[in-house]
Amino acid sequence: MSAGSVRVDSWLWAVRVYKTRSQATAACRAGHVKIGGASVKAAQAVKIGDQVRIRIAGFDRILVVKQTIVKRVSAVTAAESFIDETPPPPSREEVALAPRRDRGAGRPTKRERRELEKLRGRDESGSTSYDD
């Protein structure tokens, strides 16, 4: 049941991160799966101790491989195959404070965009200067 290294798509399916192996393969193809900070293909080998970062529903899930398994196993055994280092999700208050545009309001104007950038605390020095 355990091997030295297995394909990352097979491992993600076996530990029940994705319902099907084809979903895991599609996530790898889309660049949502990273090992050691680099996007990987579905055939990339995953070994014990590797940190796998998966982007699901806009949030990153960070798993450290504790055991490599090839076949899909019970939920209890699957949970024992990795260490979940995912940070807790933001609180409802933090999510509610995020500004959102009304549906159908169209694209923001330049003034609205600058106000949003200022509100988010992004650096405004990104503009280019053509003075030499």
Image (cartoon, rainbow, N blue to C red):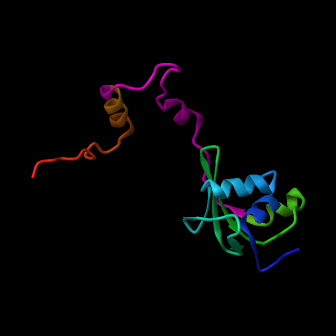
Q: Quadrant of residue 54?
A: bottom right
Q: Is residue 35 visible?
A: yes
Q: Residue 93: image x %, image y %?
A: 55, 33
| Vertical arrangement, residue 92 with respect to residue 15, above or below | above
- Judging depth in this view, the residue of 11 and 94 nearest the camera is 11
Q: Residue at x 45, y 22 (%)?
A: 106
109, above or below 10, in the image: above
* Residue drawn 64% across the image and 60% down it: 85
Left or right: 102 in relation to 25: left
Image-based side of 91 in relation to 113, left or right? right
Kindly tell me whether residue 61 is visible in this rendering. Answer: no
**Residue at the bottom extreme, as displayed:** 4
Q: Which residues are magenta?
A: 83-111
Main SS, magenta residues? loop
Q: Decide: is 60 above or below 72.
A: above
Q: Quadrant of the N terminus?
A: bottom right
Tell me where residue 55 appears, x and y as whole percent. Answer: 62, 52
Q: Is residue 66 above or below residue 55?
A: below
Q: Which of the pair 112/98 is nearer the observer?
A: 112
- Residue 42 is a magenta residue: no
Residue 101 counted in the magenta span: yes
In front of the other: 62 or 72: 72
Task: Residue at 71%, 75% (x, y): give it.
Answer: 48
Q: Looking at the picture, how far across and down is residue 49, in whole percent? A: 67, 74
The answer to which quarter of the image holds residue 28 is bottom right
